[in-house]
């Protein structure tokens, strides 16, 4: 039963990354940010702090760097730092997890997170 549940979670996360691909093609960066945040929260709920921090890190890449967005960026950064602290995530573990995020996005055809 545990493996079946894990498979369902994997498929659900695949749907999220498919949504990022769709919003990427539509050029809807705000929706990509929302989906990345949702994925980060799913991983946090599963207590996979490393992957949660990596998805929050990806979300940070998507957020604008305008002064008006500073509070939002700070909140996402605080969430990432909290996950890193809870899971004792080192920068090397975060880098490896970011590689898994990039691989998941590449498998689903999404472009890198940089703003156009």
Image (spheres, helix red, strand yellow):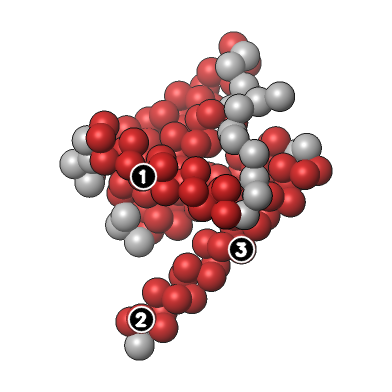
Residues 71 and 41: in front is 41
Q: Earlier in the sequence, mark 3 or mark 2?
A: 2
Which residue is disc 3 drawn over? Answer: 15
Numbered mark located on residue 3 in the image: 2
Q: Is residue 27 above or below residue 74?
A: below
Decide if residue 56 is in sight here.
yes
Residue neighbourhood size for the residue with mark 3, other residues' Cα within 10 Å, grouped as few (<14), some (14–19), many (≥20) = few
Q: Position of residue 57 (x, y in %)?
A: 44, 34
Numbered mark located on residue 27 in the image: none
Q: Is residue 3 above or below residue 105?
A: below
Alpha carbon separation for disc pair 2 and 1 = 22 Å
Decide if residue 84 is in sight here.
no
Q: Earlier in the sequence, mark 1 or mark 3?
A: 3
The quadrant of the image that shows the N terminus is: bottom left
Residue neighbourhood size for the residue with mark 1, other residues' Cα within 10 Å, grouped as few (<14), some (14–19), many (≥20) = some
Q: Position of residue 78 (x, y in %)?
A: 38, 31
Q: Residue furthest top?
A: 67
Q: Secondary structure at mark 1?
A: helix
Alpha carbon separation for disc pair 3 and 2 = 18 Å
Q: Secondary structure at mark 3?
A: helix
Q: Residue furthest right?
A: 26
């Amino acid at each position: 039963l545990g493996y079946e549940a894990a498979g369902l979670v994997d498929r659900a996360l695949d749907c999220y990354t498919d949504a990022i691909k769709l919003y990427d093609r539509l050029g809807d960066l705000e929706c990509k940010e929302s989906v990345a945040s949702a994925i980060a929260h799913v991983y946090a709920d599963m207590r996979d702090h490393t992957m949660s921090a990596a998805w929050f890190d990806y979300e940070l890449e998507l957020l604008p760097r305008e002064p008006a967005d500073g509070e939002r960026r700070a909140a996402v950064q605080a969430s990432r730092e909290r996950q890193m602290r809870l899971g004792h995530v080192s920068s090397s573990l975060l880098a490896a997890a970011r590689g898994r995020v990039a691989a998941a996005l590449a498998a689903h055809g999404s472009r890198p997170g940089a703003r156009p």
